[in-house]
Amino acid sequence: MADPLHERDLARPALDLVARAAGRYLEALPDLPVRDPAADVVFDRLGGPLPERGDGTLASIEELLDIGTRGAIQSSGPRFFHLVVGGATPAAQAGDWVTGLLDQPAGLWIGSPLATEAETVVLGWLKDLFGLPDTYGGVLTPSATFANLTALACARHWWAARHGVDVSADGLAGLPTMPVLASGYVHPSNRKALQILGCGRDTIRICARDDAGRVDIDAMERALIEIDGPAVLIASAGEVNTGDFDPIDALADLARRYGAWLHVDGAFGLFAGVSPRLAHLVRGVERAHSVAADGHKWLNVPYESGFVFVRDADMLGRAFGSWNAPYLPEAGDTHLDYNRLGPESSRRARALPIWATLRAYGRSGYREMIERHHDLACRLGELVEEAPELEPLAPVRLCVVCFRYRPVESGPDARTEAELDELNRRLGAELNADGRVYVGTTVYRGRVALRPAIVNWRTSAADIDLFAAVVREIGARVAAEPRGGTPTTGDA
Ligand SMILES: *Cc1c(COP(=O)(O)O)cnc(C)c1O
């Protein structure tokens, strides 16, 4: 087998193979273990030398489907609570297939007017969904990391201009360090963005009033007075350990008073704004200069999907446009080229699955899903409260439940904090090795903790009850092991 031209009639049968496998896979998904470590043996079949003569279309796809459906982690199923990983709604998943089918080069209008129009429409719908002014500029990105990068590139452009420098043309040389202030909640992706932008990963001044990282507004204000010039504030809407929020309104007040740029990282927390009962958590977000979020988390669109909005719509073009490449459209071209508004050049039409899911379920569908997840998080919070050996470490705010296992022991038998950390680390690793549920550990206020995040449309009360039962079962087993005898394993 060689030239794909000889197999042109096999495109349709190949897709039929995928569709048939998809039916079986999706039917089984709710009951599959999240991870079956024994299935890792299929990874061996990925390897080998580059084929000299290929196997052909159908053999290749059959093999990929077999390896994939066995070896994949079932992160789009209902009991994957690690990280913050959304599923794929039926419409978003099918919309993603349409994106692959049409294979649009979505960077330039001339490459795909369809993708451009769809991107403009979904950005408008998303602004409406989150209560952001329609006048904000925006662009779809691969992720919240890229959305933060895009927003902070705009902030950097604004800041440099305040120092009389066009950073797009001339770079950062000669400028001072850009002052960036945040609470301890700031997500590492903002550091990564600053690192890429040449502003430095470790330049963020953390203004926190406790070991959880909650913002110290007075300290932030003192820092702004001391800086006495343009600065960038980052507000976290939905912190990953507990789902807590910075008070966006209070940061917006500071930004206004001291002429700072306010960026809101709302990767998943921005979605609180969709529910009237949770919207107070993001009060003030419409006052931000930039807002970043993910589509592949709570929007339940397949990877990769993110988006960013910027109040000064021109800033995106200033930070990312003007390439001076003669084969690209002229300046003044009236058609919008989204690749001039963000860090990517060629890109897929990632508007299409977003369009499909918003068209399918609308504002009310998303409100129901988000409120259901909040209810489920509260239910898990109650199960934790009721279980004598489970200890809540933070109130349930949105969709994350932060707690640890703490056996009922007293007197000389009671474990030290270090032993409890070791126990919870083992518990996290054992839970994931068991595979019925999947969850991550974190260190919150110096303690190793579990922090399940509930953001998958499929997750039900039965999944939550099973999660709590499995934690208690495996926790009891791990707690009964001889102490100090097991070597420390890495964080799961
Ligand atoms: C997940 C997350 C990010 C990064 O998102 P990616 O999609 O992984 O790039 C940034 N900020 C917050 C608050 C997050 O939860």
Image (spheres, rainbow, N blue to C red):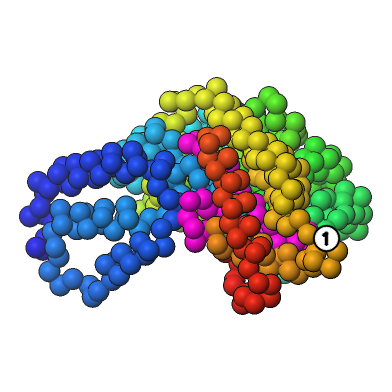
Q: Is residue 359 above or below residue 297?
A: above
Q: Residue at x 79, y 55 (%)?
A: 212
User: The residue tagged with tag 1: helix, strand or loop?
Assistant: loop
- Residue numbers of the magenta segment: 432-459
Question: Image quadrant for the C terminus?
Answer: bottom right
Q: Position of residue 48 (x, y in %)?
A: 25, 74
Q: Is residue 232 left or right of residue 275?
A: right
The quarter of the picture where residue 47 lies is bottom left
Residue 79 versus residue 321: which sits nearer the camera? 79
Q: Is residue 367 left or right of residue 327?
A: right
Query: On the image, numbered disc 1 is attached to which residue?
Result: 410
Q: Is residue 78 visible?
A: yes
Q: Residues within 10 Å of mark 1 (few under 14, many from 20)?
A: few
Task: Confirm or reject: label 1 Cβ below 8 Å from ligand 1.
Answer: no
Residue 156, percent from left and from top: 68, 55
Disc 1 residue type (three-letter): Ser
Is residue 397 positioned above or below 38 on the image?
A: above
Name the spot of residue 198 as percent of width and height, x first.
64, 66
Is residue 240 on the magenta stretch? no
Residue 72 in percent (x, y) is at 38, 55
Residue 451 is covered by the magenta coloring: yes
Instruction: Identify the residue shown where x is 49% and y is 58%.
Output: 434
What secondary structure do most residues of the magenta stretch adopt?
loop
